[in-house]
Image (cartoon, rainbow, N blue to C red):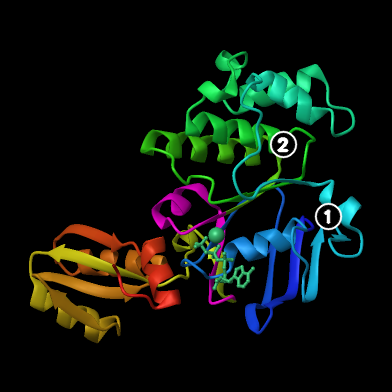
């Protein structure tokens, strides 16, 4: 397995009497978009500020590309591109001039690098326009180009879709995914907008009150062994129920005239073929996908507002 680019090991943060981050540990790998989720006040921004060295770690360790952010800051931070609050841009300079300016702060940034970044974030056609005439979405993209100017191995974005319209969110999602896959860089994005994260991320961590609740893959249901809920429409509901319970040893509920079972992907395959062999006609099988929102609310036990 590839080495993680970012590692948090039992990270704690205390400010005064407040224990804000509690024993937080997770890893982020090259090429993945990693979602960092949690309700307002959960500690996402605080964690990100520690990762980029804007505030210190009370205890525990954060390593970027193997270097500790507290012991070897310079080496660790070389690998990071980040937008923590709003991107800092010069309004009276064009997009391209902004990137030239930021490029000067790091070594070996060529004119081609700048052009390539502009193309990557889709700003090539407006590169000579002054940033003060940019929309919010255009500024966000330029911020990403800026954060990536020195070829970081990990990009860290706190709520990158804040304030974007649906089209902007979609574009952001597409190019962040594109960047991760094309350049094999890791992207850590925080958000509390779950529907977005579900489409954007490969894996995600959920935190609540500064504690990690869970880390998992967005698409874990493709796994053969994972049990999901299925609804099935058949010609003879009662007969099918008895058959499944007696022959297949699976509990069946009947809901709105449909069978409801909890089985694995492999299990549903077997169930369908044995029902068919026993002359029960199946009209449809529906997997009830548990959305990220369901999992998030379950994990953080919040009421749906
Ligand atoms: N400088 C500080 N002093 C004291 N408490 C703080 C400080 N900064 C943040 N906190 C507290 O730490 C907790 C986590 O805040 P943080 O901003 O990290 O949450 P968040 O997950 O980013 O929330 P949001 O979704 O609203 O951005 C909150 O309870 C907040 O009040
Ligand atoms: Mg925040």
Q: What stretch is highlighted in magenta?
A: 190-210
Q: Position of residue 89 (x, y in %)?
A: 65, 32
Which of labels 1 and 2 is toward the front? 2
Q: Can residue 1 be seen in this view?
A: no
Q: Mark 1 points at which residue?
A: 65
Q: Which of 11 and 295 is in front in this view?
A: 11
- Is residue 101 rendered to the left or right of residue 283? right
How far apart marks 1 and 2 lie (CA) works out to 16 Å
Check residue 282 for magenta coloring.
no
Residue drawn 79% across the image and 58% down it:
3
Q: Quadrant of the C terminus?
A: bottom left
Residue drawn 69% across the image and 78% down it:
14
Q: Name the residue under label 2.
A: 148
Q: Which of 208 and 87 is in front in this view?
A: 87
Q: Where is residue 255 in the image (x, y as percent from the top left)?
A: 13, 74
Total number of numbered labels?
2
Q: Within 8 Å of ligand 2, the CB of disc 2?
A: no
- Is residue 58 rendered to the left or right of residue 229? right
């Amino acid at each position: 397995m590839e080495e993680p680019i970012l590692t948090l090991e039992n990270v704690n943060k205390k400010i005064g009497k407040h224990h804000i981050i509690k024993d937080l540990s997770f890893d982020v790998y090259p090429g993945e978009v990693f979602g960092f989720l949690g309700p307002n006040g959960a500690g996402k921004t605080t964690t990100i500020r520690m990762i980029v060295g804007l505030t210190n770690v009370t205890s525990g360790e954060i390593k970027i590309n193997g270097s500790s952010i507290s012991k070897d800051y310079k080496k660790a931070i070389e690998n990071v591109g980040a937008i923590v609050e709003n991107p800092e841009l010069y309004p009276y300079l064009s997009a391209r001039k902004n990137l030239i300016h930021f490029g000067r702060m790091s070594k070996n940034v060529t004119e081609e690098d700048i052009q390539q970044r502009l193309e990557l974030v889709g700003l090539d056609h407006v590169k000579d326009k002054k940033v003060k005439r940019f929309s919010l979405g255009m500024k966000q993209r330029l911020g990403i180009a800026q954060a990536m100017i020195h070829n970081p191995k990990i990009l860290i974005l706190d709520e990158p879709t804040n304030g974007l319209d649906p089209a902007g969110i979609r574009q952001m999602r597409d190019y962040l995914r594109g960047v991760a896959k094309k350049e094999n860089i890791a992207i850590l994005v925080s958000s509390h907008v779950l529907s977005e994260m579900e489409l954007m991320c490969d894996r995600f961590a959920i935190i609540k009150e500064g504690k990690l609740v869970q880390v998992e893959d967005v698409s874990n249901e493709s796994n053969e062994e994972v049990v999901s809920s299925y609804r099935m429409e058949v010609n003879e509901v009662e007969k099918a129920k008895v058959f499944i319970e007696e022959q297949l040893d699976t509990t069946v509920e009947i809901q709105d005239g449909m069978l409801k079972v909890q089985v694995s992907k492999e299990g549903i395959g077997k169930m369908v073929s044995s029902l068919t062999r026993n002359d029960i006609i199946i009209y449809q099988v529906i997997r009830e996908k548990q959305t990220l929102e369901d999992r998030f609310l379950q994990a953080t036990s919040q009421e749906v507002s």
